[in-house]
Image: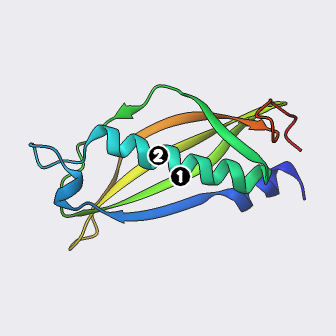
Amino acid sequence: MTIEERIKHSETIIFKAVFPNTTNHYDTLFGGTAMQLMDETAFIAATRFSRQRMVTVSSDKIDFKKAIPAGTIIELKGKVAYLGNTSLKVKVDIYVEEMYSDSREKAVSGEFTFVAIDKDKKPIKII
């Protein structure tokens, strides 16, 4: 399988409903919760791409472009954006959808860097 095919095959999409227990006092999704969901989506995409043990080593600039209100649906999309020797980057976008209309727009985006590790937690080449 080519690198491009592996990237396509490892794209990860997760949907979640935004319930009140995940929102702040403004009735919008906690930023930390959004980041946790993004990291999880990125981890799954990185693992599906490499089929190796992967750990998060950094998150790049995360842009919160639109508040995500309670009572909406979010779609998280993760895709490998860069491949190095022992590391890779996954770009994650969150789209917010109204539950009862076709309204949909990008709300958050960011990148997460992962490193492949061996059983001793030492960096290894991504194969």
Position of residue 56 in the picture relative to residue 126 (left or right):
left
| Other residues around mark 2 within 10 Å, as few (<14) / some (14–19) / many (≥20) | many
Quadrant (top left/top right/bottom left/bottom right) for the N terminus: bottom right
Q: Is residue 92 left or right of residue 95?
A: right
Q: Is residue 15 above or below residue 37?
A: below
> Taking the image as drawn, is residue 20 in sight?
yes
Q: Quadrant of the C terminus?
A: top right
User: Compared with residue 49, is residue 121 higher up or lower down, i.e. above or below?
Assistant: above
Q: Position of residue 105 (x, y in %)?
A: 33, 52
When asked about the image quadrant of residue 26, the answer is top left
- SS at circle 2: helix
Residue kind at label 1, given as amino acid type? Thr
- Where residue 41 is drawn, which disc sits there? 1
Residue at the image position 28 percent from the left and 69 percent from the top:
102
Q: Would residue 7 be seen by someone viewing this image from the given angle? A: no
Which residue sits furthest bottom?
100
Give the x, y percent position of residue 25.
Answer: 9, 43
Q: Secondary structure at mark 1?
A: helix
Q: Are marks 1 and 2 in contact (CB under 8 Å)?
A: yes
Query: How many numbered markers are drawn?
Result: 2
Instruction: Name the amino acid, label 2.
Output: Met
- For mark 2, what is the residue? 38
